[in-house]
Image (cartoon, rainbow, N blue to C red):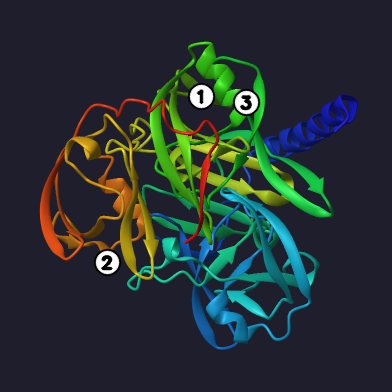
Amino acid sequence: MNSRVYKWVVKTVCVSALTAVQVALSGAAAAQVVEEFDFAAQADFIFLPVAVRGQTLRFIVDTGSTGSVFNGRLRHLLGEPRGTARVATVAGVEEIERFEAPATKLGKLEIRYDRGRVYCQDFGDAFRCPSKPIDGVLGIDALKAFVVSIDFDEGKLRVLDSVAPEPGEGVPLIWHKQRGFLEGPFALATLAGRSHREFLIDTGSHSRNSGGVEARFFDWLSDNGDLDWLGYTDISSFSKTATVRQGRANSIAVGGFEYRGAVFDRMKKNSLGLGFLCRFKVTFDFPNNVMYLRKGKSFDREDVYNLSGIHLVRRNGETIVHSVDSESAGSAADLRQHDVLLVIGDTKASDLSMFELRQRLCRNGSCRLTIRRGHAELTIDLRLGDKPAPNAERAEKDADRGSQ
């Protein structure tokens, strides 16, 4: 975007947001709760019950997705496809089918999708867990009309008729149009005391670290000593998984809030995910382009990262070691490529989502694994502690491991 146009857009959004903030702080009457939903605050996603054609489905709240997506196994609810679309995901560009949107309700609220369309894609094994089915994604196209409050301390998501009094500090939200689609919301943040950058506010990012930093910016911060390289981790879209670098930044500041020691993945764009947002009570006033932040009980929660050096994939219901970093805890425990993980601690691997599995590899201490190697079952004690040494032998580019 032309720099003059960009500055005008930011100024216009900020003036609009400031007006909305002044209204919110002017002693307005208490906001009314239109709908209220419980969610598990420490889970990998925020799920909401969405009603479509007489069925109640579990959809993820994903402000980082420009469109709403149905799991491929629900294709029969959508009629005939109306074409395809190419979309950018955390693991690369993917092609998905486009459909006319069915009548959809969130509680008593009618969902109106952008241009009356939704999308459908087969969700890969990385997102399959029998006890925690994922039926779809409720994107920003479905949420933009609402005021949404997310209280991570209470585990409550509320749709409000207006912003409640004393919602916290207002941060302007910025939007862009890309090929006719609304992209956003973005907020300005300062990383390691450097210049303001736009960060996508992404409630669909299910890592427990703070988010992602655009690759060139990540490398520049690392080269200048503002970001400590920690090693590698795995990220998944609905059909692909990629391995990316992780680093700990000196600080991240949004509005008047500063957090030190935030962990970020090296990504295609800057983003702040659930790992950052869960430090606050967040109110999205989407109609007025403002995000309000108020410190929560978890504000000082420390970001976690992969301490194992193990990279897992899920194929055909099995959890498989794809690779093991040299000079890592996994290498020291003699874990090998193609080992099949059966049990971690006292829980079957098949009973855990990939997010939950990876979280268990971020905790200090001893972790007992049962694996299958060939025809033999082995018990391995994995000792997790200091950060894994960055492996110079790994490729510089993110390693796309293909369909999962």
Foreground of the two, 113 or 401: 401
Separation of residues labelled 1 and 2 (CA atoms): 35 Å
Q: Position of residue 240 (x, y in %)?
A: 52, 56
| Element at label 2 | helix
| Nearer-N-terminus badge (1/2) | 1
Residue at image position (60%, 52%) is: 63
Callout 3 amino acid: Arg
Callout 1 amino acid: Ile
Given contact means CB atoms under 8 Å apart, are the residues at marks 2 and 3 in contact?
Answer: no
Instruction: Residue 217: name its quadrant.
Output: top right
Q: Position of residue 393 (x, y in %)?
A: 41, 29
Pointer 1: what residue?
252
Callout 2 amino acid: Asp
On residue 216, the disc is 3
* 401 sits left or right of 117 in the view: left
Q: Residues within 10 Å of mark 1 (few under 14, many from 20)?
A: many
| Element at label 3 | helix
| Nearer-N-terminus badge (3/1) | 3
Q: Residues within 10 Å of mark 2 (few under 14, many from 20)?
A: some
Instruction: Residue 37: name its quadrant.
Output: bottom left
Instruction: Residue 51: name its quadrant.
Output: bottom right
Q: Report the quarter where the N terminus lies.
A: top right
Separation of residues labelled 2 and 3 (CA atoms): 38 Å
Q: Nearer the viewer, mark 2 or mark 3?
A: 3
Residue at image position (42%, 23%) is: 229
On residue 351, the disc is 2
Q: Position of residue 318 (x, y in %)?
A: 32, 66
